[in-house]
Amino acid sequence: MGLQCGIVGLPNVGKSTLFNALSSAKAEAANFPFCTIEPNVGVVTVPDERLNTLEDLVSPQKVIPTVIEFVDIAGLVKGASKGEGLGNKFLANIREVDAIIHVIRCFNDDNVVHVAGSVDPVFDKDVIDTELQLKDLESIGKKIERNQKIAKSGDANAKKQIAVLEKFKSSLEGGANARAVEASEDELEVLKDLSLLTIKPVIYVANVEEDAIHSGNEHVEALKEAIQEEEAEVIMISASIESQIAELEEEDEKEMFLEEYGLTESGLNKLIRASYSLLDLITYFTAGPTEVRAWTIKKGWKAPQAAGVIHTDFEKGFIKAEVIKIPDYQEYKTEVAIKEAGKMAVEGKDYIVKDGDVMHFRFNV
């Protein structure tokens, strides 16, 4: 399953600079609003040391990591929900992504203009939240109207849907995002066809200057205070540092560069880990002489569902899964030795796949 994260933010917060640093795509970065007119998509491989371990053990012809798509979406301004600026494009593009990465300017630089005239991360957050909330209210309002017409005939289901929709409408009108509303699975099902913007999970990226990458600053603290009720994560990243890392080709050069800044990993790695955690994703592997490959699935998926990510026939005709743990692979070196040691588990349809499982599926169609 592919993972797509939309990078959003007001103009001139460092959004496109960060995108360029994180991905193989290159958006135009400039000191004026709307320099990213169309959404740019950058495909980033997910770093995973376990792939290197399996490559050393299996010596495959190729290694295929899993990937994340980062979508750089045109900068948003106040009034976007009514079509101001590039609002309609922005809102349509954000509707398609799995998660939102909201980049917020937390650095001072007189050479980079701020669309509102001054650096205020809480203001920036509120502008985008408000525009998304207004669009969601529009979507909910239309569905309420449709159901009210049906409910006049005494339709009980329509009445139930109206109650759910009114619950979310009230919350949005109060300035809260839809994701903050406590709701059951049945209630969320009512909203599914609306693809609400504020129900999408979000990571806030505080773009800080280089010397604030460890301690943060007053802007970061203000942002953290503003999102307390959302229980969302704030990640500090310096787009400037990430840009410099992106220019280095050798891994040892990147490691040395990070060490100079006292960092153990890049902002990209932090963002990928946070994205996986946010969406409850895990990775399992397939390994053989042809290829070693990583596969992304939802935490809690059973073996047939996981097999279906490779091919739908694998899920339809699922018989069993042979499962190896990587530590056992490291100890016994080969599948033959693992089997002889009794360390290869044979699992059925109810097996819940674990992060890091090495799997081989048996199926019949």
Image: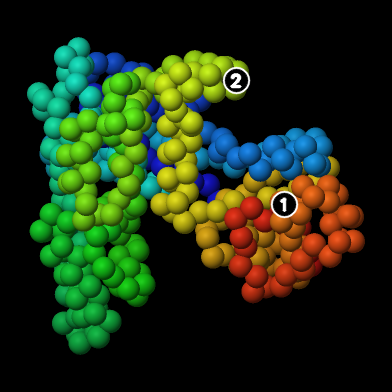
Provide the residue designation for mark 2: 252
Query: Callout 2: helix, strand or loop?
Result: helix
**Residue beneath the point at 72% across and 52% down:** 327
Dot 2 and dot 1 residues touching (CB under 8 Å): no
- Report x, y in % for residue 105: 23, 29
- Report x, y in % for residue 265: 48, 31
Which quadrant of the structure image shows residue 88? top left
**Residue beneath the point at 59% across and 51% down:** 283
Amino acid, disc 2: Asp
> Is 321 situated left or right of 27 in this image?
right
Q: Quadrant of the C terminus?
A: bottom right
- Report x, y in % for residue 344: 79, 62
Q: How dense is the environment of label 1, judged by Cα within 10 Å: few (below 14), some, or many (20 and up)? A: few
Provide the residue designation for mark 1: 327
Q: CA distance from mark 2 to mark 1?
A: 26 Å
Q: Is residue 290 visible?
A: no
Q: Looking at the image, is 99 positioned above or below residue 320?
A: above
Furthest toward the top, the residue is 111
**Residue beneath the point at 68% across and 68% down:** 316
